[in-house]
Image (cartoon, rainbow, N blue to C red):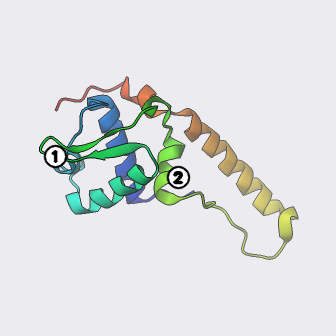
Amino acid sequence: MKYSKATNYALHTMLFLVAATPNKPIGVQKLAEQQDVSPTYLSKVLTKLVKAGMIESVSGVNGGYRLKRNWEDVSFLDIIQAIEGNASLFDCSLDHGPECLIQRVVLEAEEKMEEHLRNQTMSELAKKIKIVL
């Protein structure tokens, strides 16, 4: 699992959407201003979240992006994997096969980290902050 700037923006955008107003669309310009990022760049990140089924794009004058159903269950891991994919952070490049002791240790560490991220939802985190639109 990797953690890029795109993932950072995705996590912050999702938190903002959950905390601000889950059902009301928010424009990409407003979302970009919240993080001081280019709307063009953020649009690419948002497209990945749309493809992952976490948010939807709403057209029109009052359009923008809003959360989809079951957003309460979206975890940090879901968002990270939507942006980065499911690739492992750790990969032994030597040809030891599945019995590589080094690989076992780092994969176990990654599994524990993923479990922690899977258990942390945006809805739980959003209860700790107040967003003013």
Residue that mark 2 sits on: 81
* Secondary structure category for the residue under label 1: loop
40 horizontally vs 92: left or right: left
Residue 97 position, x and y percent, is: 85, 69
Q: Are marks 1 and 2 in contact (CB under 8 Å)?
A: no
What is the x, y in percent for residue 61? Answer: 12, 44
Residue 37: which numbered mark, if any?
A: none
In this view, the residue in front, 51 or 32, is 51
Q: Is residue 38 visible?
A: no
Residue lying at 72% horizontally and 54% vertically, measured from the top left: 107
Q: Earlier in the sequence, mark 1 or mark 2?
A: 1
Q: State the separation of the CA atoms marked 1 and 2.
A: 30 Å
Q: Is residue 91 above or below residue 129?
A: below
> What residue is shown with label 1?
60
Please, which residue is most extreme toward the left here? Answer: 61
Residue 31 in the image: above or below residue 18: below
**Mark 1 or 2, which is nearer the eye?**
1
> Judging from the image, what secondary structure is the residue with disc 2 in?
helix
Q: Residue lying farthest front?
A: 60
Name the quadrant containing residue 12.
Answer: top left
Q: What residue type is disc 2 on?
A: Gln
